[in-house]
Image: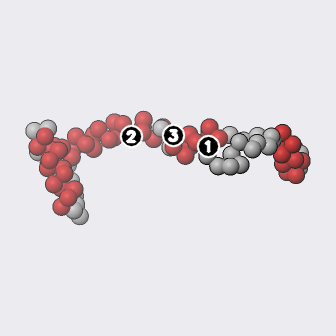
Amino acid sequence: MANLQIKGINNELYEELKRLAAAENRSVSQEILFLVKTYLAKKGHINKLKTPAQVLLELAGSWEDDRPAQEIIGDIKSVRKNSRKLSEGF
């Protein structure tokens, strides 16, 4: 069985690992092995998940229109209705 030495762990991280291990009645080494195995088992699923940005871009969508921009803007402005409801504020 191979051995692994990890260098450069800050004290806060090590203390958190010790707390996790104690809560699960494991040694720190056993806890680290458990966490690594759990991560590797879920890694494929995690990588398939879409990021919030990807979801937003899919929802936003776009359209294709061969008309020039000024014509599209004119169409949008022509269907707008003027309203005086908020002219005096809330």
Q: Which mark is residue 43?
A: 2
Residue 32 coordinates in the image, percent (x, y):
21, 46
The answer to whether residue 78 is seen in the rendering is yes
* For marks 3 and 2 on the same chain, the one whose residue lies earlier in the sequence: 2
User: Which quadrant would residue 21 be assigned to in this image?
Assistant: top left
Of circles 1 and 3, the one toward us is 1
26 sits left or right of 80 in the view: left
> How are the residues colored?
secondary structure
Tags 3 and 2 touching, CB below 8 Å: no
**C-alpha separation, residue under disc 1 versus residue under disc 3:** 11 Å
Q: Which residue is mark 1?
A: 57
Of circles 3 and 2, the one toward us is 3
57 sits left or right of 84 in the view: left
User: Which quadrant would residue 41 be assigned to in this image?
Assistant: top left
Q: In what quadrant of the picture does the N terminus appear?
A: top left
Q: Residue at image x 51%, y 40%?
A: 50
Q: Which residue is mark 3?
A: 50
Image vertical order of residue 5 relative to residue 37, above or below: below
Residue farthest to the front, as pictured = 88
The residue closer to the viewer here, 56 or 17, is: 56
Residue 80 coordinates in the image, percent (x, y):
81, 41
Q: Residue at image x 68%, y 49%?
A: 88
Q: Residue at image x 64%, y 49%?
A: 89
